[in-house]
């Protein structure tokens, strides 16, 4: 590559900056504000989604005065409501962890945070365990029609036979996604950290 | 008191050349350079509210830019190239030889660029800061390691370059 080519390369980026309206600060800031609004809308959508689910389940299965609605169904509804509330909290935390990555800290701190963020630790997902157990309980209660001991045991086993494999398959799919998308980022961050320490 | 938009405008116009430099150092193609440029600007915008003025604004901007570039390099480790700038005064003072001939200077630059591209990502980042004439204290602030550690690393990198370029057509000073 000769000097002219190098200068040309430098010009190319400057031309692109110009042609993409990056010299027009008003256009640029409009784009950034749109991006901020999009993120905020996304958060609001999920917040409302969980809220609507909580209201629907509370209205239909918890406080519904319908006499045909037995105690098991009402407990099931309550478990679903609890699970949705916990999912909403988990989602909020997860979203803010990944959205608000701080690039203003030093490279060392940024890499440290990235290595932790992309790590697959059991403790991080322990948060989800109460929600998973609540849904399991909700499904069991929704299947119970009579309170006989044999019937109850059968129903519990019947639900577990479906629910546990579904949860295990979901967890395995999550692991595969982590291995493909997040593990390489964690490994790269750890490698750079090692280099910085060395 | 100036609002966020005015502050952003001022920061970008005052640091545009530095940001363009970083994009060119770390990204192999114009498309990638543009991606990094957009992401750096986006993150300066997002982080502006949290800027407390503890560090100098130029260092703060550079810290964001380097972190974005390092994150990018982590994703594209094998493609990462360091494109040094022949116009940089640091580069001109780096190589031995009295030749003013632009062809010879270009050959020297290519040799140096080849050697720089053999360095690890962190060493490239540190050399990028050295070539952009940042002080040891500023490099320590941006990278997050102690000043003595920065000095040791710079010394080691220069030693490596000196060693690898020894006996070649041009030597590293």
Image (tube, rainbow, N blue to C red):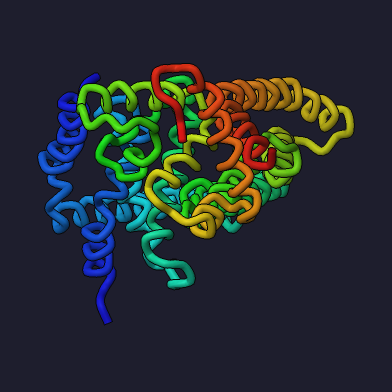
In the rendered image, residue A163, in percent from the top left (x then y), is placed at 69, 26
Considering depth in this image, is B143 or A94 the residue closer to the camera?
Answer: B143
In the rendered image, residue A19, in percent from the top left (x then y), is placed at 10, 39
Q: Is residue B38 above or below residue B107?
A: below
Residue B173 is left or right of residue B15, and the answer is right
Considering depth in this image, is A73 or A119 the residue closer to the camera?
Answer: A119
Residue A71 is left or right of residue A182, and the answer is right
Task: Say which quadrant the N terminus of chain B sits in.
Answer: bottom left
Residue at 65% x, 49% y is B149
Q: Residue furthest right?
A: A149
Residue at 47% x, 56% y is B135
Taking the image as drawn, is residue A173 in sight? yes
Considering depth in this image, is A61 or B151 the residue closer to the camera?
Answer: B151
Q: Is residue B149 above or below residue A139?
A: below
Residue A159 is left or right of residue A25, and the answer is right
- In which quadrant of the rendered view does residue A155 lie? top right
Considering depth in this image, is A5 or A175 the residue closer to the camera?
Answer: A5
Residue at 40% x, 27% y is B112
Q: How many marks?
A: 0
In the rendered image, residue B47, in percent from the top left (x then y), is placed at 40, 60
Q: Is residue A174 above or below residue B152?
A: above
- In which quadrant of the rendered view does residue A3 lie? top left
Q: Residue furthest bottom?
A: B1
Residue at 66% x, 22% y is A172
Taking the image as drawn, is residue A142 in sight? no
In the rendered image, residue A82, in percent from the top left (x then y), is placed at 65, 52
């Amino acid at each position: 590559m000769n000097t002219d080519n190098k200068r040309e390369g430098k010009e190319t980026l400057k031309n692109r900056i110009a042609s993409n309206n990056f010299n027009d600060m008003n256009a640029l800031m409009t784009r950034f504000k749109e991006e901020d609004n999009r993120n905020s809308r996304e958060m609001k959508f999920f917040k409302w989604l969980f809220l609507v689910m909580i209201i629907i389940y509370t209205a239909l299965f918890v406080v519904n005065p319908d006499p045909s609605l037995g105690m098991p169904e009402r407990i099931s509804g309550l478990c679903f409501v609890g699970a949705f509330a916990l999912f909403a909290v988990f989602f909020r935390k997860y979203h803010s962890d990944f959205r608000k990555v701080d690039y203003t800290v030093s490279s060392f701190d940024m890499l440290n945070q990235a290595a932790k963020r992309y790590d697959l630790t059991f403790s991080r997902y322990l948060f989800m365990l109460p929600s998973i157990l609540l849904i399991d309980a909700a499904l069991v209660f929704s299947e119970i029609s009579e309170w006989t001991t044999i019937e109850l045991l059968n129903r519990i086993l019947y639900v577990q036979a479906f629910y546990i494999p579904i949860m295990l398959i979901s967890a395995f799919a999550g692991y595969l996604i982590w291995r493909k998308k997040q593990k390489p980022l964690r490994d790269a961050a750890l490698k750079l950290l090692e280099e910085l320490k060395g | 008191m100036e609002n966020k938009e005015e502050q952003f405008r001022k920061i970008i116009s005052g640091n545009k050349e530095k940001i363009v430099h970083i994009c060119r150092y770390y990204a192999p193609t114009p498309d990638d350079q543009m991606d990094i440029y957009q992401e750096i600007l986006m993150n300066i915008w997002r982080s502006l509210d949290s800027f407390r003025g503890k560090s100098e604004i130029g260092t703060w901007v550079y810290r964001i830019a380097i972190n974005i570039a390092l994150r990018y390099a982590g994703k594209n480790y094998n493609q990462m190239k360091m494109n040094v700038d022949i116009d940089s005064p640091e580069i001109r003072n780096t190589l031995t030889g009295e030749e003013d001939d632009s062809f010879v200077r270009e050959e020297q630059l290519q040799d140096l660029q080849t050697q720089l591209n053999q360095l690890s990502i962190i060493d490239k980042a540190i050399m990028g800061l050295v070539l952009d004439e940042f002080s040891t204290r500023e490099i320590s602030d941006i990278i997050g390691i102690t000043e003595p550690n920065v000095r040791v690393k710079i010394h080691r990198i220069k030693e490596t370059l000196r060693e690898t370029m020894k006996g070649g057509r041009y030597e590293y000073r």
